[in-house]
Image (spheres, grey):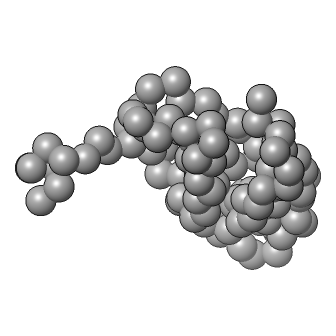
């Protein structure tokens, strides 16, 4: 209904089936941070398809291989699924991902 009424703008960067999980609204900068499978997207609030910034953050290859050897599914479990997007201060966001069952955390500078 939203598409038919032309009252929404679909995000076109999702063609890869990235399993979007977490959102963080950055009203001060007019952006939306989206945590996905192996990616973090920084989207413009006015038009989510304009000036899209994407951070590729996969799990280490050796961790993915260990995950597969443990019998986990390579496509649905052995990746770095972004689970935490938390404001840290005015310039940084704290981010954590699953890292193919070996969690990873870091900071993103928003400048």
Q: Position of residue 63 (x, y in %)?
A: 88, 58
Quarter assignment of residue 96? bottom right
Q: Nearer the viewer, residue 79 or 29?
A: 29
Q: Position of residue 18 (x, y in %)?
A: 54, 52
Which residue of the protein is positioned furthest toward the front in this rendering? 28
For the point 31% across and 44% down, which residue is it?
10
Horizontally, is 108 left or right of 20 in the view? right
Picture quarter with the N terminus: bottom left
How many marks can you see?
0
Is residue 99 among what the camera can see? no
Horizontally, is 94 left or right of 73 in the view? right
Q: Nearer the viewer, residue 54 or 68?
A: 54
For the point 80% across and 50% down, which residue is it?
93
Q: Is residue 85 above or below residue 5?
A: below
Picture quarter with the C terminus: top right
Q: Position of residue 52 (x, y in %)?
A: 53, 30
Is residue 71 among what the camera can see? yes
Q: Is residue 34 above or below residue 98?
A: above
Horizontally, is 101 left or right of 35 in the view? right
For the point 58% across and 47% down, which residue is it?
27
Q: Position of residue 79 (x, y in %)?
A: 72, 57
Which residue of the protein is positioned furthest toward the bottom in this rendering? 71
Horizontally, is 76 left or right of 100 in the view? left
């Amino acid at each position: 209904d939203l598409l038919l009424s032309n009252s929404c703008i679909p995000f076109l960067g999702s063609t890869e089936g990235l399993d979007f999980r977490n959102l963080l609204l950055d009203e001060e900068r007019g952006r939306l941070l989206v945590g996905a499978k192996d990616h973090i997207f920084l989207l413009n609030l006015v038009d989510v398809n304009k000036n899209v910034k994407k951070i590729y953050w996969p799990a280490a290859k050796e961790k993915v291989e260990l995950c597969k050897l443990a019998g986990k599914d390579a496509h649905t479990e052995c990746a770095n699924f972004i689970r935490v997007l938390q404001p840290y201060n005015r310039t940084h966001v704290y981010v954590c991902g699953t890292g193919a069952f070996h969690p990873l955390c870091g900071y993103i500078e928003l400048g």
